[in-house]
Amino acid sequence: MDQFDHSLEVFIESAGWMAPVLFVLLHVLRPFFFLPVIVVCIAGGVLFGFLEGSLLSFIGLSLMSLISYLLVHTFPRFQKRLTRLKDKVFKDRKVTVSQVMVLRIMPFVHFHLLSLYLIEMSASFKEYVYYSLLGLIMPAVFYTAFGQVITELPWYLTILLLFILIGVFQLLGRINKSQMQSKV
């Protein structure tokens, strides 16, 4: 990971004014390199600073969300694969928009899978874009600002943070379920 960060830093410095464009492109190509979102966002914070790194990560993740939408609607086979993955990961479970937003913050959760959930919950492309962009603000800011701190935390604090996020995810599911039952 340190070697990747150093190599990326040298490459970005030599790129000059093209560095932000290349960084956004890295976000778009990230799935092909099997890089987690957190790694790229951390690199953005290190290379560009908090504000510019967060903004560039948000732009890159937003483009990736739009590409996810296009992939799902253009390639039925891609949608089938994601649906199978969804059935394996969240078997017989309904996930809400707020839960998807919490899952976006968790490292190593499949980006396209969460996009599929948002696509299925949205009535239109405009609504998908709204939910998707709203759900990308926190990961871009959180990982860029605190990503380096998270990677330096002892393993037990990292696991504690993961359990806190899982607890918030579960709580949001219960709140949504009780709201649905009270409407009936």
Image (tube, rainbow, N blue to C red):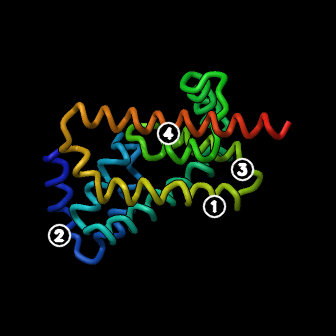
- Mark 3 sits on what residue? 122
Q: How far apart are marks 3 and 4 (CA)?
A: 23 Å
Residues at badges 3 and 1 in contact (C-beta under 8 Å)? Answer: no
Q: Earlier in the sequence, mark 4 or mark 1?
A: 1
Mark 4 vs mark 1, foreground winner is 4
- Mark 4 sits on what residue? 168
Q: Residue at the spot x=58%, y=55% of the render?
A: 132
Nearer the observer, 118 or 146: 146
Residues at badges 2 and 1 in contact (C-beta under 8 Å)? Answer: no
Q: Residues within 10 Å of mark 4 (few under 14, many from 20)?
A: some
Query: Is 72 rendered above or below residue 10?
Result: above
Mark 2 vs mark 1, foreground winner is 1
Direction right: furthest residue: 184
Q: How far apart are marks 2 and 1 (CA)?
A: 36 Å
Q: How far apart are marks 3 and 1 (CA)?
A: 9 Å
Query: At label 3, which amino acid type do we have?
Result: Ser
- x%, y% of residue 39? 29, 48
Residues at badges 4 and 2 in contact (C-beta under 8 Å)? Answer: no
Q: Distance between the residues labelled 3 and 2?
A: 42 Å
Mark 4 vs mark 2, foreground winner is 4
- Mark 1 sits on what residue? 130
- Mark 2 sits on what residue? 14
Q: Earlier in the sequence, mark 3 or mark 4?
A: 3
Quadrant position of the N terminus in the picture:
top left
Q: Which of marks 3 and 2 is nearer the N terminus?
A: 2
Query: At label 2, which amino acid type do we have?
Result: Ser
Which quadrant of the view contains residue 127?
A: bottom right
Q: Residue at the spot x=46%, y=34% of the render?
A: 166
Query: Is 160 rendered above or below residue 12?
Result: above
